[in-house]
Image: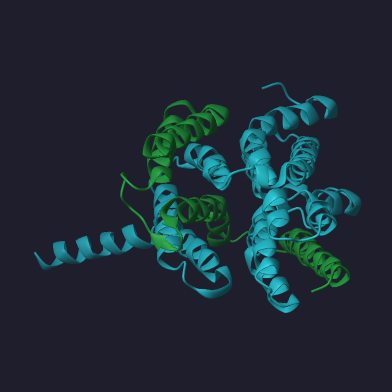
Chain colours: A green, B cyan
Amino acid sequence: MNEASLFLVVIGMGVITYGLRAGSLQLGERLPHWPWLNSFLRFVPVAVLSAIVAEVTLLANNTIDLSPVTNHRLVAAVLAILVAWRTRHVLLTIVVGMIAFWILQGISF
Amino acid sequence: MPENQSNRSLFWAGVRATLPLMTSVAPFGMLVGASGLTAGIPAGVIMAMSPVVFAGSSQLLALQLIASGSPALVLLLTTLVVNLRHVLYGISLAPHIRSLGRGWQWLLAYFMTDEVFAVSISRYNQDEAVAQPNLHWFYLGSGLTLWSGWQASTAIGLLLGSQIPASWGLDFAIALTFIALVVPALADQAAVLAALVGGSLAVLLSRLPYNLGLVTAALGGILAGMAVDLGWLSRNRAVKQGEEENIR
């Protein structure tokens, strides 16, 4: 694709993304207060974000890596989960996880 | 918590709640800027994505697809599927901003990202009992903070370009943010199950085309949480126990 059509694609992506965001806010207003719907919505952030975390952490080059020896992300993520669980501190969780990851990477060089 | 905080204090509370996330949003934005440039995509196109689309994971994916020569239709379809989760966010937020005017709703829709949603919805749920009518200022503070950080970090990534080595693992930073946001929300068995099922399915279904595995995994996790929350499982167990007692 040339630069002009790439810009058109970017605009298309923007329209789609904003459409989903604004459209769902309008849709949500008209939804009734069913208990199952409230329960459904309660689990949306937890399920979606956990799915992304698992993908980024456990899949290296599209193969599942569950070994703490070769998968440094897994070890760093477990450490970050422990920090988040004990402290509930966002910044500390990210910093500890990232430093652990870098140290493990450094050791394996 | 004092009732009826001023708009300004709520705005700054939103800014403060979002600033810590910059430690991971910034590297992720830099990664988006740098990876596109390395793939030979024009800098203008990469930079335009950040304000026009404003959705990190779909931006990174789109740049990879452009680099591999995918047609426009695939790019647009991928954007649609990857960002479908925003529908779930919108439906969750809608009851809280029902009373606002259309202008506010359209503005807040623009800032609806994973981070802003997670930070704001927990504040909305926390303050529901106090009936804080101007919490949208908190959301706006959170949204503007994330937006500014995202634009700046994409630009820095463009400037640094290929000087950023892959071994820094900048994409891992976003996983750490999500861990920091999710773990405090795991308050009961149902939430823990939703997280475990969502995470496991995401890995098992990762081969599905167009990132459909992520959406399917999320739905599976939500259903697992609902099963516990609504007593689908325990009611069955209670019925079975009752039957066993009747037999005796």
Position in image of residue B168 (x %, y %) = 55, 41
Q: Which corner quadrant of the image does residue B66 belong to?
A: bottom right
Q: Is residue B23 left or right of residue A81?
A: right
**Residue nearest the observer in this picture, B110 or B185:** B110
Q: Is residue A65 left or right of residue B18?
A: left
User: Can see residue B187?
Assistant: yes
**Residue nearest the observer in this picture, B224 or A85:** A85
Which residue is farthest left?
B248
Which residue is farthest top?
B2
Position in image of residue A32 (x %, y %) = 67, 62
**Residue nearest the observer in this picture, B211 or B134:** B211
Work out whether B110 lies above or below B209: above
Work out whether B44 lies above or below A78: below
Position in image of residue B69 (x %, y %) = 69, 73
In this rendering, the count of numbered labels is 0
User: Can see residue B83?
Assistant: no
Q: Which corner quadrant of the image does residue B87 belong to?
A: bottom right
- Quadrant where the C terminus of chain A lies? top left
Work out whether A31 lies above or below B143: below
Q: Residue at x 45, y 50 (%)?
A: A57
Q: Residue at x 48, y 29 (%)?
A: A96
Position in image of residue B39 (x %, y %) = 69, 60
